[in-house]
Image: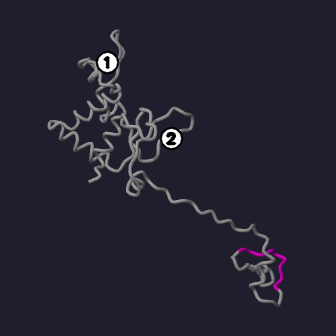
């Protein structure tokens, strides 16, 4: 059993709660002045931004369309939904190249046709076909499902983003309008 003289020396703490050096002997001054003797590193407080999920972002701002990229290090924002062709949200109307020039194909083995010669772009025509198809009465259940799954979410697709003031010829823009009505 240790004798009372073998006890450890008393250790003092600074106002921040850090131990002062073992050889510290308290001066007769106020204990608040002992901080000068503290040899600990100054505390740096890092304020971390709160993590916000895609669902929370959508509640704060209007959902937007994002162009996917293959750039090294690029990541889709958290909560964004990819709506490209291999997904259930994909546009069945695709542009194909034929001997007669570019054509629109509906589905994988569907009909192949041209588009009106009224100056509308092929991408714009394929987007309009998608809008007409998804808003048909027989697609009401599909549209209701898409609205439930995509409401308030950012949508990602490979289509290029439009220039300022230009129309957005992408089916993801159609889905954004239908899933997030402004009325």
* Depicted 132 relative to depicted 53: above or below: above
Q: Position of residue 178 (x, y in %)?
A: 27, 44
Residue 20 lies in the magenta stretch: yes
Q: Main secondary structure of the magenta part?
A: loop
Q: Which mark is residue 150?
A: none
For this orientation, the residue located farthest to the front is 118
Comparing 76 with 24, the one in front is 76
Horizontally, residue 121 falls left or right of residue 76, namely left
Horizontally, residue 154 falls left or right of residue 105, namely right
Q: Residue at x 55, y 33 (%)?
A: 71
Comparing 181 with 46, the one in front is 181
> Which of pointers 2 and 1 lies earlier in the amino acid sequence?
2
Comparing 2 with 158, the one in front is 158
Q: Residue at x 83, y 83 (%)?
A: 25
Horizontally, residue 182 falls left or right of residue 71, namely left
Q: Secondary structure at mark 1?
A: strand
Q: Which residues are magenta?
A: 18-26
Q: Position of residue 159 (x, y in %)?
A: 41, 32
**Residue under numbered circle 1:** 103
Q: Residue at x 46, y 36 (%)?
A: 68
**Residue under numbered circle 2:** 75
Q: Position of residue 84 (x, y in %)?
A: 37, 33
For this orientation, the residue located farthest to the top is 99
Which image quarter: residue 120?
A: top left
Using the numbered discs, state the Cα–Cα distance from disc 2 to disc 1 in whole angstroms: 33 Å
Q: Residue at x 29, y 21 (%)?
A: 117
Q: Secondary structure at mark 2?
A: loop
> In which quadrant is the C terminus drawn?
bottom left
Disc 2 crowd, CA 10 A, few/some/many (<14, 14-19, 20+): few
Residue 44 lies in the magenta stretch: no
């Amino acid at each position: 059993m240790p004798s009372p003289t073998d006890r450890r020396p008393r250790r003092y703490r600074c106002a921040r709660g850090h131990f002062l050096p073992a050889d510290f002997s308290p001066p007769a001054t106020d204990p608040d002045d002992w901080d000068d003797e503290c040899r600990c590193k100054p505390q740096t407080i890092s304020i971390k931004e709160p993590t916000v999920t895609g669902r929370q972002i959508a509640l704060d701002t209007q959902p937007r369309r994002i162009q996917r990229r293959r750039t090294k290090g690029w990541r889709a924002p958290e909560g964004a939904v990819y709506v490209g062709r291999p997904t259930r949200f994909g546009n069945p109307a695709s542009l194909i190249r034929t001997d007669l020039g570019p054509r629109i194909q509906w589905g994988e083995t569907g009909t192949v046709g041209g588009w009106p010669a009224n100056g509308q772009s092929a991408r714009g025509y394929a987007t309009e076909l998608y809008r007409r198809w998804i808003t048909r009465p027989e697609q009401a259940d599909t549209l209701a499902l898409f609205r439930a799954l995509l409401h308030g979410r950012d949508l990602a697709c490979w289509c290029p983003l439009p220039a300022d003031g230009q129309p957005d010829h992408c089916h993801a823009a159609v889905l954004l309008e239908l899933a997030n009505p402004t009325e």
